[in-house]
Image (cartoon, rainbow, N blue to C red):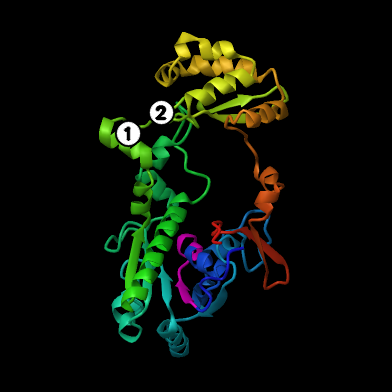
Amino acid sequence: MNPPIFKGLKVVELASVLAGPAVGMFFAELGAEVIKVENKTTGGDTTRHWKMPSEDPASPDSAYFYSVNWGKQHHFLDLTQAADREQLMRWLNEADIVISNFKSGGAEKLGLHFAKLKKTNPRLIYASISAYGEDDLRPGFDVAIQAETGWMHMNGEAGGPPVKMPVALMDLLAAHQLKEGILVALLQRERTGKGSEVTVSLFDAGVASLANQATNWLNLAHLPQRIGSRHPNIAPYGEVFTTQDKKLLIVSAGTEQQFRALCHVLGASQIAENERFATNALRLENRDELASQLQAAFRCFTAEVILERCQAAQVPVAPIRNLQEVFKLPAAQDLVLEEKTEAGGVSKRVRTAVFKVK
Protein backbone atom coordinates (compact mmCIF):
# COMPACT_ATOMS: atom_id res chain seq x y z
CA MET A 1 0.00 0.00 0.00
CA ASN A 2 1.31 3.42 -0.95
CA PRO A 3 1.56 6.16 1.70
CA PRO A 4 -1.52 8.47 1.88
CA ILE A 5 0.24 11.15 -0.13
CA PHE A 6 -3.04 12.97 -0.83
CA LYS A 7 -4.28 13.06 2.76
CA GLY A 8 -6.04 16.38 3.28
CA LEU A 9 -6.95 16.71 -0.40
CA LYS A 10 -10.71 17.02 -1.04
CA VAL A 11 -12.14 15.61 -4.25
CA VAL A 12 -15.76 16.00 -5.35
CA GLU A 13 -16.81 13.43 -7.92
CA LEU A 14 -19.72 14.44 -10.17
CA ALA A 15 -19.13 11.51 -12.52
CA SER A 16 -20.65 8.13 -13.22
CA VAL A 17 -19.96 4.87 -15.08
CA LEU A 18 -16.22 4.03 -15.30
CA ALA A 19 -13.74 6.68 -16.45
CA GLY A 20 -14.48 9.50 -14.00
CA PRO A 21 -15.08 7.22 -11.00
CA ALA A 22 -11.81 5.41 -11.74
CA VAL A 23 -10.03 8.75 -11.30
CA GLY A 24 -11.88 9.36 -8.06
CA MET A 25 -10.91 5.95 -6.72
CA PHE A 26 -7.27 6.60 -7.62
CA PHE A 27 -7.23 9.61 -5.31
CA ALA A 28 -9.14 7.72 -2.60
CA GLU A 29 -6.53 4.96 -2.67
CA LEU A 30 -3.82 7.55 -2.09
CA GLY A 31 -5.51 9.12 0.93
CA ALA A 32 -7.75 11.86 -0.46
CA GLU A 33 -11.24 12.51 0.85
CA VAL A 34 -13.50 11.68 -2.11
CA ILE A 35 -17.14 12.81 -2.01
CA LYS A 36 -19.15 11.08 -4.71
CA VAL A 37 -22.36 12.90 -5.53
CA GLU A 38 -25.04 10.78 -7.18
CA ASN A 39 -28.38 11.75 -8.70
CA LYS A 40 -31.07 10.81 -6.21
CA THR A 41 -33.83 11.05 -8.82
CA THR A 42 -32.32 8.34 -11.07
CA GLY A 43 -31.12 5.91 -8.41
CA GLY A 44 -27.51 7.10 -8.45
CA ASP A 45 -24.63 6.03 -10.66
CA THR A 46 -26.08 4.06 -13.57
CA THR A 47 -23.60 1.23 -13.06
CA ARG A 48 -25.30 0.38 -9.75
CA HIS A 49 -27.91 -1.28 -11.97
CA TRP A 50 -25.56 -3.01 -14.43
CA LYS A 51 -25.93 -6.44 -12.85
CA MET A 52 -24.92 -9.90 -13.99
CA PRO A 53 -27.79 -12.41 -14.25
CA SER A 54 -26.41 -14.13 -11.15
CA GLU A 55 -26.63 -10.98 -8.98
CA ASP A 56 -29.43 -10.27 -6.53
CA PRO A 57 -31.84 -7.88 -8.27
CA ALA A 58 -32.78 -6.43 -4.88
CA SER A 59 -29.21 -5.46 -4.03
CA PRO A 60 -28.55 -1.69 -4.21
CA ASP A 61 -25.23 -2.20 -6.01
CA SER A 62 -23.70 -4.27 -8.79
CA ALA A 63 -20.27 -5.87 -8.93
CA TYR A 64 -19.57 -3.50 -11.84
CA PHE A 65 -20.20 -0.51 -9.57
CA TYR A 66 -17.76 -1.89 -7.00
CA SER A 67 -14.92 -1.86 -9.55
CA VAL A 68 -14.20 1.89 -9.30
CA ASN A 69 -16.05 3.06 -6.18
CA TRP A 70 -13.90 2.08 -3.22
CA GLY A 71 -13.10 4.42 -0.35
CA LYS A 72 -15.59 7.16 -1.22
CA GLN A 73 -18.32 8.97 0.67
CA HIS A 74 -21.59 8.48 -1.25
CA HIS A 75 -24.24 11.20 -1.19
CA PHE A 76 -27.51 11.12 -3.12
CA LEU A 77 -28.66 14.63 -4.03
CA ASP A 78 -31.50 16.13 -6.02
CA LEU A 79 -30.06 19.31 -7.48
CA THR A 80 -33.52 20.70 -8.16
CA GLN A 81 -33.85 21.07 -4.39
CA ALA A 82 -32.34 24.20 -2.82
CA ALA A 83 -30.95 22.43 0.25
CA ASP A 84 -29.16 19.81 -1.85
CA ARG A 85 -27.72 22.47 -4.17
CA GLU A 86 -26.46 24.46 -1.20
CA GLN A 87 -24.78 21.39 0.27
CA LEU A 88 -23.06 20.64 -3.02
CA MET A 89 -21.84 24.23 -3.35
CA ARG A 90 -20.32 24.08 0.13
CA TRP A 91 -18.34 21.02 -0.90
CA LEU A 92 -17.32 22.59 -4.20
CA ASN A 93 -16.10 25.78 -2.54
CA GLU A 94 -13.83 23.68 -0.30
CA ALA A 95 -12.72 21.20 -2.96
CA ASP A 96 -9.25 20.86 -4.42
CA ILE A 97 -10.44 18.78 -7.38
CA VAL A 98 -13.76 18.25 -9.14
CA ILE A 99 -14.23 15.28 -11.48
CA SER A 100 -17.14 15.44 -13.90
CA ASN A 101 -18.46 13.82 -17.05
CA PHE A 102 -21.50 15.91 -17.88
CA LYS A 103 -22.95 15.84 -21.38
CA SER A 104 -22.04 18.86 -23.47
CA GLY A 105 -23.74 21.91 -21.93
CA GLY A 106 -24.90 19.96 -18.87
CA ALA A 107 -22.50 21.58 -16.41
CA GLU A 108 -23.43 25.08 -17.62
CA LYS A 109 -27.13 24.28 -17.30
CA LEU A 110 -26.63 23.29 -13.66
CA GLY A 111 -24.21 26.13 -12.92
CA LEU A 112 -21.44 23.63 -12.21
CA HIS A 113 -18.94 24.65 -14.89
CA PHE A 114 -15.38 25.78 -14.23
CA ALA A 115 -15.89 29.41 -15.26
CA LYS A 116 -18.43 29.84 -12.47
CA LEU A 117 -16.87 27.67 -9.77
CA LYS A 118 -13.41 29.26 -10.02
CA LYS A 119 -14.87 32.62 -9.00
CA THR A 120 -15.49 31.34 -5.48
CA ASN A 121 -12.68 28.76 -5.48
CA PRO A 122 -9.74 30.05 -7.56
CA ARG A 123 -7.52 27.13 -6.52
CA LEU A 124 -9.96 24.58 -7.90
CA ILE A 125 -8.79 21.99 -10.42
CA TYR A 126 -11.78 21.08 -12.57
CA ALA A 127 -11.28 17.80 -14.45
CA SER A 128 -13.80 16.61 -17.00
CA ILE A 129 -14.19 13.70 -19.40
CA SER A 130 -16.28 13.74 -22.57
CA ALA A 131 -16.86 11.24 -25.35
CA TYR A 132 -15.67 13.24 -28.37
CA GLY A 133 -14.74 16.65 -27.00
CA GLU A 134 -16.38 19.45 -25.12
CA ASP A 135 -18.29 20.86 -28.11
CA ASP A 136 -19.48 17.56 -29.59
CA LEU A 137 -23.03 16.72 -28.57
CA ARG A 138 -22.89 13.05 -29.52
CA PRO A 139 -23.32 10.56 -26.66
CA GLY A 140 -20.57 7.99 -26.58
CA PHE A 141 -19.95 4.76 -24.77
CA ASP A 142 -16.75 2.78 -24.72
CA VAL A 143 -17.68 0.27 -27.41
CA ALA A 144 -18.58 3.07 -29.84
CA ILE A 145 -15.21 4.72 -29.24
CA GLN A 146 -13.42 1.38 -29.72
CA ALA A 147 -15.19 1.11 -33.07
CA GLU A 148 -14.51 4.68 -34.18
CA THR A 149 -10.83 4.83 -33.19
CA GLY A 150 -9.77 1.71 -35.09
CA TRP A 151 -9.40 -0.68 -32.17
CA MET A 152 -12.23 -3.01 -33.16
CA HIS A 153 -11.15 -3.14 -36.80
CA MET A 154 -7.76 -4.48 -35.71
CA ASN A 155 -9.01 -6.83 -33.01
CA GLY A 156 -10.15 -10.38 -33.73
CA GLU A 157 -9.05 -13.46 -35.63
CA ALA A 158 -8.10 -13.35 -39.31
CA GLY A 159 -11.21 -13.77 -41.40
CA GLY A 160 -13.44 -13.13 -38.39
CA PRO A 161 -15.54 -10.13 -37.39
CA PRO A 162 -14.24 -7.08 -35.50
CA VAL A 163 -14.16 -7.69 -31.73
CA LYS A 164 -14.21 -5.20 -28.87
CA MET A 165 -11.82 -5.48 -25.95
CA PRO A 166 -13.35 -7.35 -22.97
CA VAL A 167 -13.01 -4.35 -20.65
CA ALA A 168 -14.02 -0.71 -21.25
CA LEU A 169 -10.52 0.13 -22.41
CA MET A 170 -11.30 3.60 -23.79
CA ASP A 171 -12.71 4.61 -20.40
CA LEU A 172 -9.61 3.34 -18.64
CA LEU A 173 -7.23 5.03 -21.09
CA ALA A 174 -9.11 8.32 -20.69
CA ALA A 175 -9.00 7.92 -16.91
CA HIS A 176 -5.23 7.53 -17.01
CA GLN A 177 -4.94 10.63 -19.20
CA LEU A 178 -7.11 12.61 -16.80
CA LYS A 179 -5.08 11.47 -13.79
CA GLU A 180 -1.92 12.68 -15.50
CA GLY A 181 -3.52 16.00 -16.34
CA ILE A 182 -4.70 16.49 -12.76
CA LEU A 183 -1.27 15.71 -11.37
CA VAL A 184 0.28 18.27 -13.72
CA ALA A 185 -2.38 20.78 -12.65
CA LEU A 186 -1.60 20.11 -8.98
CA LEU A 187 2.09 20.77 -9.65
CA GLN A 188 1.21 23.96 -11.49
CA ARG A 189 -0.99 25.07 -8.58
CA GLU A 190 1.91 24.55 -6.17
CA ARG A 191 3.95 26.93 -8.31
CA THR A 192 1.31 29.55 -9.14
CA GLY A 193 -1.40 29.17 -6.49
CA LYS A 194 -4.02 29.00 -9.24
CA GLY A 195 -6.36 26.22 -10.25
CA SER A 196 -7.06 25.16 -13.82
CA GLU A 197 -9.37 23.15 -16.04
CA VAL A 198 -8.26 19.74 -17.31
CA THR A 199 -10.21 18.02 -20.07
CA VAL A 200 -9.88 14.79 -22.03
CA SER A 201 -12.09 12.89 -24.44
CA LEU A 202 -12.43 9.14 -24.85
CA PHE A 203 -11.84 9.60 -28.59
CA ASP A 204 -8.53 11.40 -28.10
CA ALA A 205 -7.37 8.87 -25.51
CA GLY A 206 -8.22 6.00 -27.86
CA VAL A 207 -6.34 7.48 -30.82
CA ALA A 208 -3.37 8.51 -28.66
CA SER A 209 -2.98 4.90 -27.49
CA LEU A 210 -2.71 3.33 -30.95
CA ALA A 211 1.09 3.47 -30.58
CA ASN A 212 2.95 1.36 -33.18
CA GLN A 213 -0.25 0.54 -35.06
CA ALA A 214 -0.70 4.25 -35.70
CA THR A 215 2.90 4.77 -36.80
CA ASN A 216 2.75 1.73 -39.11
CA TRP A 217 -0.10 3.51 -40.88
CA LEU A 218 1.24 7.08 -40.68
CA ASN A 219 4.71 6.20 -41.92
CA LEU A 220 4.16 3.15 -44.13
CA ALA A 221 0.47 3.35 -45.11
CA HIS A 222 0.19 -0.14 -43.62
CA LEU A 223 -3.46 -0.77 -42.73
CA PRO A 224 -3.55 -3.19 -39.77
CA GLN A 225 -5.72 -6.25 -40.28
CA ARG A 226 -7.11 -8.74 -37.79
CA ILE A 227 -4.44 -11.32 -36.99
CA GLY A 228 -5.58 -12.56 -33.58
CA SER A 229 -2.92 -12.29 -30.90
CA ARG A 230 -0.07 -12.21 -33.38
CA HIS A 231 2.23 -9.20 -33.58
CA PRO A 232 2.45 -7.42 -36.96
CA ASN A 233 6.20 -6.81 -36.65
CA ILE A 234 7.60 -9.83 -34.78
CA ALA A 235 7.41 -13.63 -35.06
CA PRO A 236 6.94 -15.77 -33.10
CA TYR A 237 5.11 -13.27 -30.91
CA GLY A 238 1.50 -13.81 -29.89
CA GLU A 239 1.27 -17.35 -31.25
CA VAL A 240 -0.63 -19.71 -28.96
CA PHE A 241 0.46 -23.34 -28.61
CA THR A 242 -1.11 -26.40 -26.99
CA THR A 243 1.05 -28.56 -24.74
CA GLN A 244 1.05 -32.30 -24.14
CA ASP A 245 -1.36 -31.84 -21.21
CA LYS A 246 -3.71 -29.61 -23.27
CA LYS A 247 -2.63 -26.31 -21.66
CA LEU A 248 -2.39 -23.13 -23.72
CA LEU A 249 0.86 -21.15 -23.75
CA ILE A 250 1.61 -17.91 -25.57
CA VAL A 251 5.05 -17.00 -26.93
CA SER A 252 6.53 -13.49 -27.09
CA ALA A 253 10.03 -14.00 -28.47
CA GLY A 254 11.06 -10.45 -29.26
CA THR A 255 14.74 -11.04 -30.10
CA GLU A 256 16.84 -13.45 -32.16
CA GLN A 257 18.39 -14.78 -28.96
CA GLN A 258 14.99 -15.53 -27.46
CA PHE A 259 13.80 -17.29 -30.62
CA ARG A 260 16.86 -19.53 -30.71
CA ALA A 261 16.63 -20.22 -26.97
CA LEU A 262 12.96 -21.19 -27.39
CA CYS A 263 13.83 -23.71 -30.09
CA HIS A 264 16.63 -25.09 -27.91
CA VAL A 265 14.48 -25.64 -24.79
CA LEU A 266 11.89 -27.39 -26.97
CA GLY A 267 14.55 -29.74 -28.32
CA ALA A 268 13.95 -28.33 -31.79
CA SER A 269 17.14 -26.46 -32.67
CA GLN A 270 16.60 -27.48 -36.29
CA ILE A 271 13.80 -24.90 -36.46
CA ALA A 272 16.21 -22.10 -35.57
CA GLU A 273 18.67 -23.40 -38.18
CA ASN A 274 16.07 -23.53 -40.95
CA GLU A 275 16.91 -20.91 -43.60
CA ARG A 276 13.24 -20.00 -43.92
CA PHE A 277 13.32 -18.75 -40.32
CA ALA A 278 16.79 -17.22 -40.28
CA THR A 279 15.62 -13.63 -39.73
CA ASN A 280 12.58 -11.97 -38.25
CA ALA A 281 11.52 -10.80 -41.72
CA LEU A 282 11.63 -14.38 -42.98
CA ARG A 283 9.76 -15.64 -39.96
CA LEU A 284 7.01 -13.11 -40.62
CA GLU A 285 6.90 -14.20 -44.26
CA ASN A 286 6.71 -17.89 -43.26
CA ARG A 287 4.74 -17.43 -40.08
CA ASP A 288 2.21 -20.23 -40.56
CA GLU A 289 4.86 -22.84 -41.31
CA LEU A 290 6.91 -21.69 -38.32
CA ALA A 291 3.88 -21.97 -36.04
CA SER A 292 3.15 -25.46 -37.33
CA GLN A 293 6.67 -26.69 -36.58
CA LEU A 294 6.72 -25.07 -33.15
CA GLN A 295 3.34 -26.60 -32.33
CA ALA A 296 4.72 -30.06 -33.01
CA ALA A 297 7.52 -29.36 -30.54
CA PHE A 298 5.18 -27.96 -27.86
CA ARG A 299 3.09 -31.14 -27.95
CA CYS A 300 6.09 -33.16 -26.75
CA PHE A 301 6.12 -31.55 -23.28
CA THR A 302 3.78 -30.60 -20.46
CA ALA A 303 3.17 -26.94 -19.70
CA GLU A 304 5.04 -27.23 -16.40
CA VAL A 305 8.18 -28.56 -18.09
CA ILE A 306 8.12 -25.92 -20.82
CA LEU A 307 7.56 -23.05 -18.40
CA GLU A 308 10.37 -24.22 -16.09
CA ARG A 309 12.79 -24.52 -19.02
CA CYS A 310 11.76 -21.19 -20.52
CA GLN A 311 12.10 -19.40 -17.20
CA ALA A 312 15.59 -20.81 -16.74
CA ALA A 313 16.54 -19.74 -20.28
CA GLN A 314 14.86 -16.29 -19.95
CA VAL A 315 12.45 -17.05 -22.78
CA PRO A 316 9.12 -15.16 -22.50
CA VAL A 317 6.44 -17.85 -22.62
CA ALA A 318 3.32 -17.50 -20.47
CA PRO A 319 0.30 -19.60 -19.55
CA ILE A 320 -3.11 -18.31 -20.62
CA ARG A 321 -5.03 -18.12 -17.36
CA ASN A 322 -8.68 -17.53 -16.64
CA LEU A 323 -9.60 -15.13 -13.82
CA GLN A 324 -10.08 -17.94 -11.32
CA GLU A 325 -6.47 -18.95 -11.94
CA VAL A 326 -5.26 -15.35 -11.88
CA PHE A 327 -6.74 -14.60 -8.45
CA LYS A 328 -5.22 -17.72 -6.95
CA LEU A 329 -1.83 -16.04 -7.40
CA PRO A 330 -0.47 -14.28 -4.29
CA ALA A 331 0.65 -11.36 -6.47
CA ALA A 332 -2.93 -10.84 -7.69
CA GLN A 333 -4.43 -11.31 -4.23
CA ASP A 334 -2.21 -8.48 -2.98
CA LEU A 335 -3.99 -6.13 -5.40
CA VAL A 336 -7.50 -6.78 -4.07
CA LEU A 337 -9.26 -4.10 -2.01
CA GLU A 338 -12.22 -4.98 0.21
CA GLU A 339 -14.94 -2.79 1.64
CA LYS A 340 -18.11 -3.35 3.65
CA THR A 341 -21.35 -2.82 1.75
CA GLU A 342 -24.44 -1.02 3.00
CA ALA A 343 -26.14 -4.42 3.30
CA GLY A 344 -23.39 -5.66 5.63
CA GLY A 345 -21.52 -7.81 3.14
CA VAL A 346 -18.06 -7.37 1.67
CA SER A 347 -17.31 -6.07 -1.81
CA LYS A 348 -14.04 -6.63 -3.64
CA ARG A 349 -12.18 -4.98 -6.50
CA VAL A 350 -8.62 -4.52 -7.71
CA ARG A 351 -6.55 -1.42 -7.04
CA THR A 352 -6.29 1.34 -9.63
CA ALA A 353 -2.93 2.57 -8.24
CA VAL A 354 -0.45 -0.29 -8.38
CA PHE A 355 2.79 1.71 -8.57
CA LYS A 356 4.97 1.95 -5.46
CA VAL A 357 6.37 5.15 -4.04
CA LYS A 358 9.20 4.58 -1.54
Q: Which residues are magenta?
A: 9-22
Report the Cα–Cα distance between label 1 and label 2: 10 Å
Location of residue 340 (image quadrant): bottom right
x then y, percent, for residue 229: 50, 32
x then y, percent, for residue 338: 67, 64
Picture residue at 66% right of the left edge, 50% below the top: 331
Q: Secondary structure at mark 1?
A: helix
Please say if 29 is above or below 147: below
Q: Which amino acid lies under the numbered mark 1 shown in the image of this protein?
A: Asn
Q: Secondary structure at mark 2?
A: loop
Picture residue at 59% right of the left edge, 70% below the top: 71
Picture residue at 54% right of the left edge, 72% below the top: 43
Position of the C terminus, as image quadrant, is bottom right
Q: Which amino acid lies under the numbered mark 2 shown in the image of this protein?
A: Asn
Query: Can you identify the residue that label 1 sits on?
Result: 216
Answer with mark 1 or mark 2, whichever residue precedes in sequence. Answer: 1
Residue 247 can be seen in this image: no
Please say if 203 is above or below 317: below
Picture residue at 37% right of the left edge, 69% below the top: 187
Decide whether residue 82 is among the magenta residues: no
Residue 60 can be seen in this image: yes
Query: Can you identify the residue that label 2 sits on?
Result: 233
Proximity of marks 1 and 2: CB atoms separated by less than 8 Å: yes
Please say if 296 is above or below 28: above
Q: Residues within 10 Å of mark 2 (few under 14, many from 20)?
A: some
Position of the N terminus, as image quadrant, is bottom right
